Image (spheres, rainbow, N blue to C red):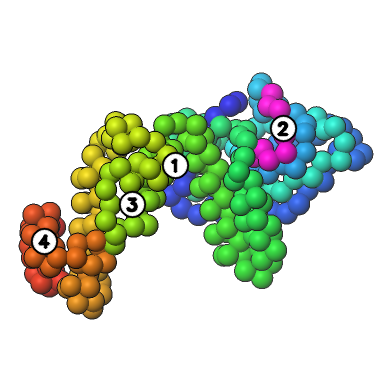
Amino acid sequence: MEWVWVPLDEPPVVVNLGVSVHGVRSRRDVFMLPDLWQLHLYGYSAELTVGATTHPIREGHVSLIPPGVQVHYLYRGRSEHLYAHLRLPGTGTGTGTGTGTGRTVPVMQDAGAETPLLAGLLRQAIAVAPAEPAMATAQVWTVLWHVARLAEAAGPHVAVAAAIAHIESNLASPLAVPDIARAAGISHNHLTRLFRAETGSTVVAYVRRRRVERARHLLRESTLPIPAVAAAVGIADVQAFNKACRRELGAPPRAIRAGAGG
């Protein structure tokens, strides 16, 4: 087994988590968890066989193993990892394509630069679990999202993700495509091609859409004056803001505040 479908619509049910030490009395472990997923973050080198597939373990690797699958560990000595045993709503074996919000995730991945973040989240979850189980669940859910997105880091969409992160953080500021491309670490033309391939939209259209979406939220959910809303979404000229709302939302700002507009 090399890949599993991981649903992420709902938080996991965390049954147990902690720090586990192996390889002291025996160099081998063979077992399965019939009803629980296993999330492990490793701090050692070893081998893990899941089904018929053997995966090398290195420090900083993370594995996600579905219920009912036999695992075979071969250690090289004392081996310590962080773990969480959990249920994911709506899953059985974890194989197949799945539906809803989720990812198809490799059973074993190198967390790389994400390792300190994942370790910190898991250690905090372990520390708070006895007194604050809901907080521990939130931390583990966050870890699952990060693990699910690790496989995406090798694709061209990484630049698109960096561009989107820059846009979302700077909606109140001028956003020229060359500046966005520079923040993503690629050329203007390359970003234009990747962005359309990944999102089906141009960069300019995405910025325009996100600005009016945020404007609609601020108009309906806050009492900010309309000029302040316009400035908050990077449209300093109120007349231009009025035109943008009419064009994109079908109504002027005052009408949107009153509940009109798409």
Q: Which of the two marks, 1 or 3, is nearer to us in this view?
A: 3
Q: Left of 141 or right of it: where is 112?
A: right
Please determine whether, in this image, residue 212 is positioned above or below residue 231: above
Q: CA distance from mark 1 to mark 3?
A: 24 Å
Does the segment drawn in magenta span residue 81? Answer: no
Q: Residue at x 49, y 41 (%)?
A: 149
Contact, mark 2 vs mark 4 (Cβ under 8 Å):
no
- Identify which amino acid the numbered label 3 is placed on: Ile
Q: Residue at x 35, y 41 (%)?
A: 181
The magenta segment is: 54-62
Question: 14 and 240: which one is in front?
Answer: 240
- Identify which amino acid the numbered label 4 is placed on: Ala
Q: Which of the two marks, 2 or 4, is nearer to us in this view?
A: 4
Q: Is residue 132 visible in the rendered structure shown here?
A: yes
Q: Which residue is mark 3?
A: 167
Secondary-structure class at tag 3? helix
